[in-house]
Image: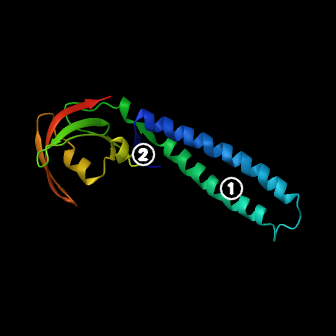
Amino acid sequence: MSETYLTKDGYEKLQVELADLKRQKNELSLEIGEAREQGDLKENAGYIYAKEKQNLVMRLISDLELRLRGAKIVDNLAINKAEIRFGATVTMRDENSGNTLTYTLSSADEADPSAGKISVSSPLAQGLLGAAEGASVKISLPSGEKHLAILKVEYK
C-alpha cells in the first residue's frame, strides 16, 4: 500500500467524497432492485445502466478507501518549517512581471490552481522545494524561466 500525503482539509474532503459515493451505491442498489422487478434483464436498459454505474462507484469507493488507509496527514508531520515543503503556503514576487503570487503546495488530489493550491509534483512547486523565506529562485517552466523572490513561507 502506497502512502498518500494529504493536508487535514484534503483528508476530510476525501472522507466526504467517500460518504457521498457510499450514498450513491445505496441508491443504485435500490434502482437495480426496481429494474430487476421489471422482468427480462438482458434487454432492460435501466438495469444495465445501473449495474455499470454501480461497478464504477464500487471501483471509486475501493480506490478512495485504499488512499485514505495509506494517508499521512502532513499537518502532523515534523518538518523544517523554515523551508518550503509540502503543505507550505508561499507568497512570492515574480521578478519579471512584479506580480505577487501565493500558492499552497498540496497533493495531486488536492491541487486546484484557481484556489491557489498547486501539486507538490508540479514544475513550479519542485523549483520552490527547499527554498527559504528571503531567497531568490530561478525555475524553468514550460512557459519559460521564472525568477521568484520568496517573500513569506507559512504553514497553516
Badge 2 is on which residue? 3
Placement of 143 over or under 116, stated as above or below = below
x, y percent for residue 148:
14, 45
The disc, 1 or 2, on the residue closer to the chain's N-terminal end is 2
Quadrant placement of the C terminus: top left
Instruction: Please state which of residues 119 and 80 is positioned toward the viewer in this rendering.
Output: 119
Q: Is residue 33 left or right of residue 93?
A: right
Mark drawn on residue 108: none
Assign a secondary structure to mark 1.
helix
Q: Amino acid at mark 1?
A: Gln
Badge 1 is on which residue? 54
Q: Amino acid at mark 2?
A: Glu
x, y percent for residue 133:
15, 33
Placement of 60 over or under 79, stated as above or below = below
Instruction: State which quadrant residue 104 falls in.
Output: top left
Residue at image x 84%, y 59%? Answer: 36
Between the C-alphas of marks 1 and 2, the distance is 27 Å
